Amino acid sequence: MGPHEQGRFAPEAWGRLLQLKGSGALSAPELEQVIERALTHIDGRIALDDLRLLLEGVGVIDDTDGPGADRVH
């Protein structure tokens, strides 16, 4: 992915993707799928809330605001 693609993500959203990949919650193919969907389906800047919706689409629950904020399922 080039810098122009990464630049579409808000820093919080990009950081969350890296965190999920680093923790093993997202595999490399899943990460690619989420990034591709985000770039294809969202116009403009991709916010953290946008990312959470996309993550649900690949079966990853991002519960960073809930009681289990330290866990990703």
Image (cartoon, grey):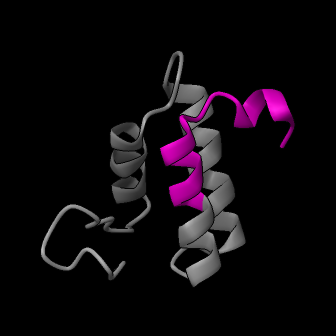
Q: Residue at the spot x=71%, y=69% of the render?
A: 28
Give the total of numbered labels. Answer: 0
Question: x%, y% of residue 54?
Answer: 41, 47
- Judged from this view, the residue extending furthest toward the right is 2
Seen in the picture, residue 51 relative to 40 is either above or below; the reply is below
Question: x%, y% of residue 50?
Answer: 38, 37
Q: Residue at the spot x=51%, y=16% of the render?
A: 43
Overall secondary structure of the magenta section? helix
Seen in the picture, residue 55 relative to 22 is either above or below; the reply is above
Q: Residue at the spot x=62%, y=71% of the render?
A: 21
Answer with the quarter of the image where residue 23 lies: bottom right
Residue 23 or 73: which is nearer the viewer?
23
Please identify the quadrant where the N terminus is shown. top right
Seen in the picture, residue 42 relative to 70 is either above or below; the reply is above
Residue 46 or 37: which is nearer the viewer?
46
Query: Start and end of the magenta stretch?
Result: 1-17
Residue 9 or 28: which is nearer the viewer?
9
Judged left or right of residue 13, residue 39 is right
Answer with the quarter of the image where residue 65 lies: bottom left
- Judged from this view, the residue extending furthest toward the left is 67
Seen in the picture, residue 12 relative to 72 is either above or below; the reply is above
